[in-house]
Image (cartoon, helix red, strand yellow):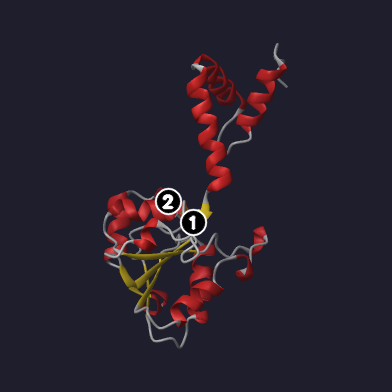
């Protein structure tokens, strides 16, 4: 365990090292960087983090992060409201939006089915997806989940829940390598995977 001459520095390092991917050496470097900033900049930084944590909402339509009850994407009249892209998390929404190849709406599950991690269908926003599709205003549902075993399991479960509804059920093309996490795919590959999507049942054969 590192020995710090200041307990305040130690507390700051401990807090920063709790962030994912931040080790203690990086946390110490960040803490000392913060110390070199003027007080106003640090106050702005701290306020931004607190405001985000305390005020951010989940869109009541798609469950994306939002400043308001309905997110900016769901509120845009130019979006194709008959097309829903199902993703695992907020990072995936950002990744797909950056491709500029998709003009529909989203549905954020909040995870994928993973029995090893204790995550089942009831822990995800699946019922609300079925409700959206059952309302009858949707033509196509794209399952844009990572091509991992857990992602494929989730796709299969969703296909069973949506079975019988008058929609086209598709999945992203396998331009994204099997086993890769969607958020780490480059924009060109991800964009092509959305554009060249295929029927889910065709991809399962």
Drawn side of residue 74 relative to residue 69, left or right: left
In the rendered view, tell whether residue 86 sits above or below residue 12.
below
Name the image quarter holding the C terminus: bottom left
- Across and down, in percent, residue 6 comes to 70, 14
* Element class at badge 2: helix
In the rendered view, tell whether residue 44 sits above or below residue 39.
below
**Mark 1 lies on residue:** 89
Give the label on residue 172, or none: none
Q: Nearer the viewer, residue 112 or 89?
A: 89
Give the label on residue 183, or none: 2
- Quarter assignment of residue 138: bottom left
Q: Residues within 10 Å of mark 2 (few under 14, many from 20)?
A: some
The label nearer to you, 1 versus 2, is 1
Residue contact at pointers 1 and 2, CB within 8 angstroms: yes
Q: CA distance from mark 1 to mark 2?
A: 9 Å
In the rendered view, tell whether residue 17 sits above or below residue 195.
above
Drawn side of residue 117 relative to residue 203, left or right: right
- Across and down, in percent, residue 77 comes to 29, 65
Q: Residue at x 48, y 81 (%)?
A: 162
* Element class at badge 1: loop
Q: Residue at x 53, y 72 (%)?
A: 128
Q: Residues within 10 Å of mark 1 (few under 14, many from 20)?
A: many
- Quarter assignment of residue 51: top right
- Across and down, in percent, residue 79 comes to 30, 65
The mark that comes first in sequence, 1 or 2, is 1
Q: Residue at x 53, y 33 (%)?
A: 47
- Across and down, in percent, residue 196 comes to 27, 66
In the rendered view, tell whether residue 35 sits above or below residue 138.
above
Drawn side of residue 86 relative to residue 8, left or right: left
Name the image quarter holding the N terminus: top right
């Amino acid at each position: 365990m590192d020995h710090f001459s200041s307990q305040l520095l130690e507390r700051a390092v401990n807090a920063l090292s709790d962030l994912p991917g931040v080790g203690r050496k990086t946390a110490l470097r960040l803490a000392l960087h913060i110390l070199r900033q003027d007080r106003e900049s640090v106050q702005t930084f701290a306020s931004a983090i607190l405001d985000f944590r305390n005020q951010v909402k989940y869109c009541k339509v798609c469950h994306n992060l939002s400043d308001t009850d309905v997110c900016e994407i769901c509120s845009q009249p130019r979006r194709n409201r008959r097309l829903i892209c199902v993703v695992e998390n907020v990072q995936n929404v950002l990744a797909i939006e950056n491709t500029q190849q998709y003009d529909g709406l989203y549905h954020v599950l909040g995870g994928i089915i993973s029995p090893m991690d204790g995550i089942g269908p009831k822990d995800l926003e699946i019922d609300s997806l079925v409700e959206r599709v059952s309302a009858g205003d949707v033509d196509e549902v794209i399952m844009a989940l990572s091509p991992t075993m857990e992602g494929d399991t989730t796709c299969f479960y969703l296909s069973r829940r949506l079975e019988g509804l008058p929609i086209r059920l598709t999945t992203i093309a396998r331009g994204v390598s099997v086993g890769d996490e969607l958020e780490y795919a480059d924009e060109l590959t991800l964009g092509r995977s959305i554009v060249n999507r295929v029927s889910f049942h065709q991809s399962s054969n």
